[in-house]
Every structure is written in structure tokens, then in C-alpha cells.
Amino acid sequence: MGVLDIGLPLMRRLCFLFVCLFTGFAALADATLTAPYVAARSYTLLEVESGQPLAALNPDQRTEPASLTKLMTAYLVFKALKEKVLSPDQTVPVSQHAWKAEGSRMFIEPQKPATVDELIHGVIIQSGNDASIALAEALSGSEEAFAERMNKMAAALGMNNTHFVNATGLPDPQHYTTARDLGVLASALIRDFPGYYPLYSIKEYRYNGITQPNRNRLLWIDTTVDGLKTGHTDNAGYCLISSARRGERRILSVVLGTNSDSARTIESQKLLNWGFQTFETQHLFQKNTPVKSLEVFKGAAREVKAGFTEEIWMTAPVGEGSRFRQTLTTLQPVVAPVAAGQKLGTLEIDYDGKPVVTHDLVALESVAVGNAFTRGWDTVRLMLK
């Protein structure tokens, strides 16, 4: 089951069953809401913190990703930087293949090696195909080998309807994705690399004497928008993935296949505004923070702290948050040894009696086996229980 897709422009009255294939949410509510008409071939709108989709049109329709491909290119480069495989000041030789790249360019030159940091700016702000290829070659030896790495990461992230053959987004019959998958990728990039995400809000970048602006026009129109990426080919149309933070909330919009640069900007702004105005998000639990202490039998400690390994948020139509109900069920008895991360129970969240989502309650610490006296005494206690 997926988010209700809007197949016709006149179908603007939505009976939402907020189903998130990204994170396994089940049906939420029968709230009748009015979604805006969006002049695009496909789109998806989601709340980043909770992972819940708010609206969608043809979210699983295959399309050329165009330069939105570069989100995956950047994701893998950020991962390499985090793992110290690359360093920002590392110089990268410019191959003939990178130098002769078609389409948008950063204007790197074979006689002038660029740093990883410069190339990242060229990919993100200038959408340079030459910079994308240079980074791909630096990380994997060739663009083809890098594409294999892109596909492995896509599978790991759950992008089940995506296939890459290059690092740039230049058209190829075997290079495709969907609005849903791009939402997964953009959300992962925001979540996994918060230190690098601010690069997407930079409005212009100068390299080799040439200043180029960021093509995301929302950066100039809406001060709450701080990313992410534009894309365009003849077949893909004009595309934009945009994200805005207002207060504690972040909403992500993926709009694909509009007719112009201005259209992708207007339609994205329309979706973002509607999402913030129509929904509210509640922060339920912080990650790695104890929410309960459970008794431990046969252990070196008498209790173990339990909590969640991720932030837990819930999104609902404005004014409907009181219809949620939380049920925490623990697995008893807890017997040592207990490993950190071990499942100790389940949090189930219902909306009007309908299951919405479940999260594992886990041990936030380890508890070793106790001494012989403790083990013997607790054996008796367990028999009596």
C-alpha cells in the first residue's frame, strides 16, 4: 500500500491513509484534506523528521533524474570524506573524460588539478558534470566503477526503483529513478551528513574566474529554503528537490517534470507552504535517551536503561495530534547478559485505533552476567514468578 496518488488534476480532495513505504508506516487517518494542484508529472512531499509522506503524484513513475543524480554523487563523496578516504584539500587530477564532459560545467582543466573541496562546490552549486566525473574517478578509478558504487548505495538506502550508469545525470535508457526514491536519497543526505548539507544553501560559486549562481531559485525567494538540487533534460523536464526548515520542522519536496524553470520553483513553493500550513509534527522521544529502566535477572546490575536509537516524531493534520495513542510493551523477564542495542520491547503508536508505526525499545547499555550468588538467587526468583 502506498500514499494515495493523484492521477487527475481534478482529484484535489484527498482521503489520506498516510502510508510510508520509506519507513514502514501503516494507515494513519481518514482526514479529508485539500492538496494543491501541482503542474508536474510526479512529485512527493514528506516530513523529514517523521519520514511520513504528506502528498504524492505518481511517486513510483520512472523518470530521468537529470542532475538530481548528483545527490548520490555527493552522498558518496561525503561518505568518503567522513571515512577519511578523501580529504577536502586533496588535489584531484582532471582527466580528458572529465574535461570534455557535456552539459553544465565547472570549467576545470587538465593542466590545473582541483581540490576535492573545490569540486564538491562545483557539483553542488554549479552542477558541474566535469566536477562530478572528476570526483567519481578520484573515488573509484572510473565513472563506470563509481556507478556500480552508486547502485549499491541506492539498494542499501531502499531506492528500489533506481538505476545509475553515470555520476552526472546525462541521459541513458538505463539511468532512471522515481520521485519516491529521490525523496529517500535527499532525506538520507540531510540526515547522514548535517555538516555538509549547508553547502546546498550557497547561492553562487566562483572557479577559474567564472562565477555561476545556484540554479535553485527558491534560495532567493524563501529564506527558510536551504537546499537541495535542480535538474533538467529534454526528457526529464524541469525538476527541483527543495527542503525548508521552519522552527523544528523540515519538509522535503521532490517535483519532477515541470515545463519551465519558473514552474518548478512555483510548484515546489506551493507544496512546501501547504505542508507547513496543513500538518504539524510532534517530537515524541529523543534517541539514546532512557525512557524506561527494566529489572535485570542474573546480572551484574539490577536494572538496564532502555530507549530508542533514533529520534521519534509523528506528523498529523493540524489539531489532530490528540488522536494518537502510545503503547509501550516490554519483553519480560530480562535475563543477563544484555547487549547494548538488544531489543527489550516495542513502542506502538495508534491513530484512532489504527496502527501507525512501531519502534523497537532497545538496551542503551550492556549488563554482564552476575556472580554465582546472584545467578542462583535470581533463578529461584524466576521460578516463583
Image (cartoon, rainbow, N blue to C red):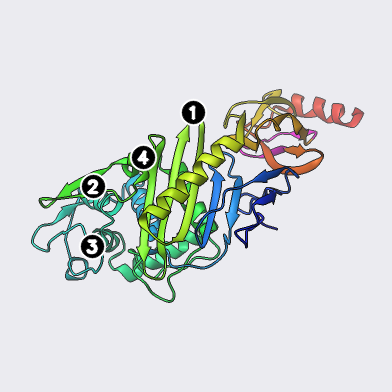
Residue 192, by quadrant, is: top left
| Residue segment shown in magenta | 332-346
Locate residue 54, reporting x and y percent.
60, 46
Question: Within 10 angstroms of label 4, few (less than 14), some, or many (20 or more) residues?
Answer: few
Say whether disc 2 or disc 4 marks the residue closer to the N-terminus.
2
* The one of 39 and 24 positioned closer to us in this rendering: 39
Determine contact: label 2, label 4, CB under 8 Å.
no
Say whether disc 2 or disc 1 marks the residue closer to the N-terminus.
2
Q: Residue 247, labelled with which disc? A: 1
Asked whether 73 falls inside the magenta stretch, the response is no
Question: Within 10 angstroms of label 2, few (less than 14), some, or many (20 or more) residues?
Answer: some
Whole-number angstrom distance, CA of label 1 to CA of label 3: 37 Å
Whole-number angstrom distance, CA of label 3 to CA of label 2: 14 Å
Query: According to the image, label 4 marks what residue?
Result: 221
Say whether disc 4 or disc 1 marks the residue closer to the N-terminus.
4
Decide: is 351 above or below 143: above
> Looking at the picture, which amino acid does disc 4 mark?
Ile
Asked whether 340 falls inside the magenta stretch, the response is yes
Determine contact: label 4, label 1, CB under 8 Å.
no
Q: Residue 375, labelled with which disc? A: none
> Looking at the picture, which amino acid does disc 2 mark?
Asp
Q: Residue at x 32, y 64 (%)?
A: 168
Say whether disc 3 or disc 2 marks the residue closer to the N-terminus.
2
Query: According to the image, label 3 marks what residue?
Result: 130
